[in-house]
Amino acid sequence: MSEEKKKKTPEDFKKESEAAFRVNLAQGSKVKKVIGVVSGKGGVGKSLVTGLSACAMNRKGYKTAVLDADITGPSIPKMFGAKQIKYADDNGNMIPSESDNGIKLVSINLLMDNDTDPVIWRGPVIAGVVKQFWGEVNWGDIDYMFVDMPPGTGDVPLTVFQSLPVDGIIVVSTPQELVSMIVEKAVNMAKMMNVPVIGLVENMSYMNCPHCNKPIYVFGESKIDSYASANGLDVLARIPLDPDFASKCDAGRIEDYEPDFMDSLVYKLEQL
């Protein structure tokens, strides 16, 4: 064994191992901040939070993008009303679709002839596609990229954490007691992968009564504050059940929805 290898510490080998998994961006692309949006289970509104976050930062004047890593359940194109990706640059790298307000988007549904066609692939193939979405797309100059991940702690989140330079994650939850346990799994995975947790977002937190405008806690009183306090985390946003928001997403017009409940999340992201 050489003298150089003898002097290496476990931390040195760890850094080398992490570097070996990293995927380089396509030539001419630059992404300043990569934010993962995760949840421990499905159906909590992770894609909605991804879309809202990208829109909020875009309205502040930042160049934003969404990498849809939820390969088997993509919903980003629908809520943005995005068009198919049909072109590549001179180097063969995909040119992202763009929303009406200039948010760059890449999703498996933007590459398919029919958006209802199922993606029936095994984990390694899906992980490979996520790497391609990062390294074989001409992203250009991006200030904030949001990565919409599938639920759980499987192949894709692991691939994203290892292959992309993730600056932090936003963990999405709902008020049900069961979800706090699932949230903790996502938080613990991030800690094990040395990825900072930016904070928590609670979706379906409440709804405003149409008669008196007082909040109605459909799923019971929220426990998110006590969980966040116990774990030293910030609550970044509480998203209400809002029929207007749902109808805009269904119509591909998420960018027309301008809520004020994203202000704390925007502030935290600007501090990264």
Image: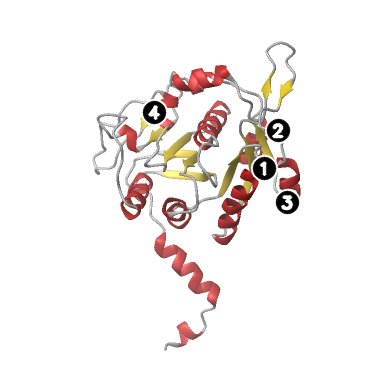
State which tag comes first along the sequence, 2 or 4: 4
Residue shown at the point (44%, 63%) measured from the top left? 19
Distance of mark 2 from mark 4, alpha carbons? 39 Å
140 sits to left or right of 269 = left
Relative vertical location of residue 38 with respect to residue 53 in this rendering, above or below: below
- Pointer 1 or 3: first along the chain: 1
Work out how far the residue at label 1 is from the one at label 4, CA to CA, in angstroms: 38 Å
Mark 3: which secondary structure? loop
The reply to whether discs 1 and 3 touch (Cβ–Cβ < 8 Å) is no
Mark 4 Cα-neighbour bin, 10 Å: few <14, some 14–19, many ≥20: many
Does the residue at mark 2 contact the one at mark 3 (Cβ under 8 Å)?
Answer: no
Residue at image mark 1:
177
Q: On residue 105, which mark appears?
A: none
- As shown in the figure, which amino acid type bears the numbered disc 2? Gly
Q: Earlier in the sequence, mark 1 or mark 4?
A: 4
Which circle marks residue 220 in the picture?
2
Q: Which mark is residue 232?
A: 3
The Cα–Cα distance between marks 1 and 2, rounded to whole angstroms, is 9 Å
Query: Mark 1, mark 3: which one is toward the viewer?
Result: 1
Which residue type carries mark 1? Glu
Where, by quadrant of the figure, is residue 204 drawn?
top right
Q: Position of residue 266 (x, y in %)?
A: 63, 34
Q: CB under 8 Å between callouts 2 and 4? A: no
Q: Earlier in the sequence, mark 3 or mark 4?
A: 4
Please state which of the two labelled residues, at mark 3 or mark 4, is closer to the viewer.
Answer: 3
Which quarter of the image is occupied by the C terminus? top right
Q: Earlier in the sequence, mark 1 or mark 2?
A: 1
Q: Which residue is mark 4?
A: 98
Q: Amino acid at mark 3?
A: Gly
